[in-house]
Image (cartoon, rainbow, N blue to C red):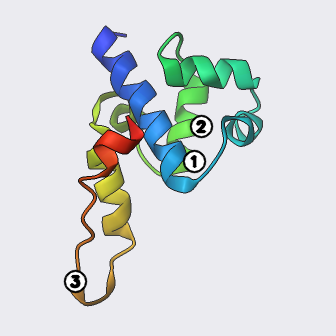
Amino acid sequence: MPASSYKSFSENLRSLRYYFGLTQKELAAAFDVLQEAYSKWERGASRPASARLRQIAEYYKFSASDLLHRDSNELLREILDRASPPQGRRIKISFLKNRCV
């Protein structure tokens, strides 16, 4: 996996965890891995096996490719769009880039 994919993936994991208010411990339990392993994924020190990557992608309702290659703000915008705010209002999320990365 190219270095940029490691960076995108780790940023996406961290941003999604922050957005949903979850801890590394909770997600490690959900994916049946040690917290240390999950922490390494977020830091970009390692990556999950492909089967685990698919499990993570399904958990967040994205494709594995999305988690590996898309910008974290794009993923968060899509989550907000899925929630469809009333009367077509769009929620401004520009603050998330600095806060989550």
Question: Which residue is farthest bottom?
Answer: 87
Q: Earlier in the sequence, mark 3 or mark 1?
A: 1
Q: Amino acid at mark 2?
A: Gln
Return the x and y of residue 49 as percentages of the image width and height: 58, 18
Taking the image as shown, residue 24 lies to the left or right of residue 29, namely left
Return the x and y of residue 72 as percentages of the image width and height: 33, 40
In the image, residue 87 above or below residue 56? below
Residue at x 47%, y 45% (from the top left corner)? 16
Q: Tell me the distance, in whole angstroms, between the alpha carbons under discs 3 and 1.
A: 26 Å
Residue on which disc 3 sits:
88
In the image, residue 90 above or below residue 40? below
Residue at x 59%, y 16% (from the top left corner)? 40
In this rendering, does residue 58 appear at all? yes
Q: Are marks 1 and 2 in contact (CB under 8 Å)?
A: yes
Q: Residues within 10 Å of mark 3 (few under 14, many from 20)?
A: few
Taking the image as shown, residue 41 lies to the left or right of residue 75, namely right
Residue at x 35%, y 52% (from the top left corner)? 76
Residue on which disc 1 sits:
59
- Could you tell me which secondary element the residue under label 2 belongs to? helix
Q: Amino acid at mark 1?
A: Tyr
Q: Amino acid at mark 3?
A: Gly
Residue on which disc 2 sits:
55
Return the x and y of residue 85 as percentages of the image width and height: 33, 80
Tell me the mark number nearer the camera, choosing from 3 and 2: 3
- Could you tell me which secondary element the residue under label 3 belongs to? helix
- Could you tell me which secondary element the residue under label 1 belongs to? helix
